[in-house]
Image (spheres, grey):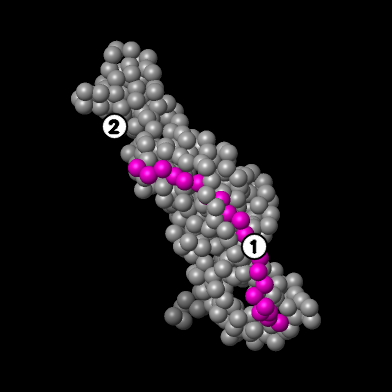
Amino acid sequence: MTQWLEWLSDNWTIVLVPFLVFASIYVIGLWIRILLFRYLGGWHSWTKWRGHQAVANSTRRPILDWFILLGAYIAVQVSALSAVYKLLAGLIISSLFIISLAWVVANISDKLIRLYSDDENASKQPTRIGVNVSRAIIGIIAALGILSVWGVPVSPFLLIIVVILLVIGLALRDTIPNYISGLQMSSGKQIKVGDFIKLDSGEAGQITAINWQNTQIKSLQGEDIIIPNSKLARATLVNYGRPLKKATDPFHFYTRLHLRELTGLKAGNLTELVTILKDMPDAVVYYHVHHFLEEHLFLAPEPANDFALWISNTLGNDILGERLASIDTFTLPNISAVKTRLIDTIEDYLRNNPDSRKAPEEEEFHFVRSISFILPTPYVAHDLGEFVEVLRKVTIDSIYFHIYEARLRLQKGTNDFSIWISDSLGEKELADRISNIDPYVYTLENLRSRIIEQVEAYFR
């Protein structure tokens, strides 16, 4: 131990200089990473590229690792180590960098392939194949890079890879065209399961399955016909689309009118507000959460509810107001759940932050009840074709009733359209697509258009 201390005393600069170099590179890396992700955030706000999150999550930590490797490499080069050890350390650090870079690129590739596959509603098999192929290519490139760093000739390995690919190509010469054709049909979406098609060779029927090798159809006589995808891609066919199902029960469109009624109750501070809110019926909470929607049906929905606006603007409590405004009504199943969330948020705040601020006179919070009148319309839909045509005609009051009132006030958990499409037509996938539309980010006219787009795209 004494000998080590004596050695450090005599040679402290030999240790200190590499350490300072390493620490400096690490600090520079932290600073560059902050600037880089700040720039990427601004770039994302401008371009709205959905792959931004995949890139950011995959590179946030590795960037620091790369600067650690860079710092270690430079520290070794300025150290008192012999040339042999410097060379060996450089080779090891370079190999670690290639492995880390390949891992990051493969991770980003996986996430982007899955992201865009989800956008295209691609099946799991082509997505899995795409992920595995990208991993294999990146792994091979990384391995060749490491061999090149260590001075190993890569030409023999490239020759072996080419020979393997040729052997695979010859072995799968009849299968590969089917896979390529399946990929083209999957990405082009010219045909899909449920469509009725007729080929120029005479085969005709409804498509029951599409995989990477063949397409299966059921003829009008009930026969199952399997057609290789390569033949289907070369054939001239007529796509008659998906026959529209008749609903087991037709959809009757209703509309609604509403009146406001003062309850006579008012609150001047947070304690009074939460105390009265506990005893208020759902109709009162519904009004104050959907107040803007009820009176401005053609405008984009107001993000904040009346409680949040009053607390922020009248009581001057921006913190609690922001918490109440951030409650996502779309994620809650009914008005009772919304009421509970409002009460819990206010009470939680008061427990930790006693607030005695009072509203000025004549600016108290007045509780208002919404009274709705439901009226039938003459419109009825027996299939999705009629549904779209009627949806183009009905008033936005009717859309409001079937979307907002059905989900929250009637406590159905979803909208009337999705329930009918799922239960009476058996189209659960389409029902889920419409149910997943967040109605609080659209005007009612835009919501009408969005639902129509989903139905038409489903059967296109």
The secondary structure type at the circle numbered 2 is: strand
Q: Quadrant of residue 199?
A: top left
Q: Residues within 10 Å of mark 2 (few under 14, many from 20)?
A: some
Residue lying at 54% horizontally and 70% vertically, measured from the top left: 282
Residue extending farthest to the right is 361
Is residue 114 visible from the viewing direction of this image? no
**Comparing marks 1 and 2, which lies closer to the viewer?**
1
What residue type is disc 2 on? Thr
Residue 131, horizontal then vertical, whole percent: 38, 41
As for residue 92 lying within the magenta part, the answer is no
Q: Which residue is mark 2?
A: 208
Residue lying at 55% horizontally and 80% vertically, measured from the top left: 279
Left or right position of 190 against 9: left
Q: Quadrant of residue 294?
A: bottom right
Secondary structure, magenta segment, majority class? strand
Residue 424, horizontal then vertical, whole percent: 36, 45
The secondary structure type at the circle numbered 1 is: strand
> Which quarter shows the N terminus?
bottom left
Residue lying at 74% horizontally and 71% vertically, measured from the top left: 313
Q: Which mark is residue 259?
A: 1
Is residue 417 visible from the viewing direction of this image? yes
Residue 28, horizontal then vertical, whole percent: 63, 59
What residue type is disc 1 on? Leu
Magenta residues, as a range? 248-268
In-front residue for pair 437/1:
437
